[in-house]
Amino acid sequence: MESETLGRLIDQHAAALELFARQWVDQPEDVVQEAFVRLAGLPIQPSNPRAWLFRTVRNGAINAGVKQRRRRRYETEVATPVSAWFEIKSLGQKEAAVDAESAQAALAALSPDQREIIVAHIWGGLTFDEIAQMAGHSASTAHRIYQAGLTCLRERLGVPCRTNSSRTIPK
Amino acid sequence: MSNEFVPHDSEMNELETALGALVPANSQIDRDRVMFLAGEASFRRLVVQRRWWMAIAASLGVVALGEAGVLAFRPPVRIVEKVVVRENPVAPTPVQVVAPRTETPPPARVDFALSLDRTAYERLAGQVLRYGLDGLPTSPVPRASDVDSMPAHVSRLQLLHDELRNALQDGDAL
């Protein structure tokens, strides 16, 4: 892979990939970096590098999350500061319609399936077909989960929600 | 962001747009380090491929050197002449199948004609029985000196013996 192509992919997708991987692991930088290195070392480049990156980061983050939880079981729990998922707008910048901290809290309260699909679709830019291939669902199922997640987000951000999820974030 | 499905209601679209306006936190990865590691991984892959081809070429070279050594140090071909005696293949002896002996009673009457060929005497006797005295071969005329010099019973025996011997030697047709 050409270095220019790799640099462009890093600039375009690194932040979204870290946000995506943050659902499973606290330190997503290593997972994302490893995914880019693996992409550069492939003998044949994938037809859709963005979808390949999201799928690789997903698998790597799930594995890293399992190791992280196993390690925490034997270590003293240390209160680590939770890093922000979104950019906090500074004074002078245009204020977003949704508060970043509220959005982060609302997203964190979603089920893993809903959060994964919402992040991949809104911030990762993946289509529902690509999400379906990545997560092992059908495209219609991915869309249904996405709608249910949006409904829950709307409730948590101030609008009533029709569905309720019992699953929580893996920590 | 492409959405191939029918969009939801307006509130959902507004929420989607509002969420999309949020910018993910800046990436914490070191871009230069990723580029360096990517280049290193690519170079490592090239080195592995190159070593693979070098290993193949080296093994083929070793094989070629071995073949050349075998050809160079091969002993000269000696032509050895020797007489080879070939024996005719012996026909396999037929295996005699011995039939199990069964206790059969002896025949009550033996066909006399079947026993004609057993001995010369029997053959002659059979000839006489079948054709009478005309079936006997002509007896040679004894010389007078021979007849006179031997007793009567000896001369008759001698004549009969000679007659029988001639009959056997000539193989007269029956």
Image (cartoon, coloured by chain):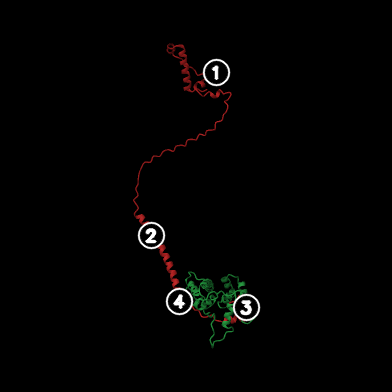
Q: Is mark 3 on a helix, strand or loop?
A: helix
Classify residue B6 by image quadrant. Answer: bottom right
Which residue is label 2 attached to? B62
Query: Residue visible at 38% across and 60% down?
Result: B62
Q: Mark 3 lies on which chain?
A: A
Q: What element carries label 1?
A: helix
Q: How far apart are marks 3 and 1 (CA)?
A: 141 Å
The disc placed on residue A152 is: 3
Q: Mark 2 lies on which chain?
A: B
Q: Do circles 4 and 3 both sit on a common chain?
A: no
Of residues A9 and B81, the one nearer the viewer is A9
Q: Is mark 4 on a helix, strand or loop?
A: helix
Name the mark nearer the viewer: 3 or 2. Answer: 3
Label 4 sits on what residue type? Arg
How crowded pointer 3 is (Cα within 10 Å; few <14, some 14-19, many 20+) is rated as many
The disc placed on residue B132 is: 1
Tell me if B67 is positioned left or right of A115 in this view.
left
Q: Which chain carries label 1?
A: B
Name the mark nearer the viewer: 3 or 1. Answer: 3
How crowded pointer 2 is (Cα within 10 Å; few <14, some 14-19, many 20+) is rated as few
Q: What element carries label 2?
A: helix
What percent of the width, then of the height, locates residue B94? 49, 35
Label 3 sits on what residue type? Cys
Name the mark nearer the viewer: 1 or 4. Answer: 4
Q: Distance between the residues labelled 2 and 4?
A: 42 Å
> Which mark sits nearer the N-terminus, 1 or 2?
2
Q: Which chain is green?
A: A
Q: How far apart are marks 1 and 2 (CA)?
A: 103 Å
Name the mark nearer the viewer: 1 or 2. Answer: 2
Label 1 sits on what residue type? Gly
Q: The red chain is which one?
A: B
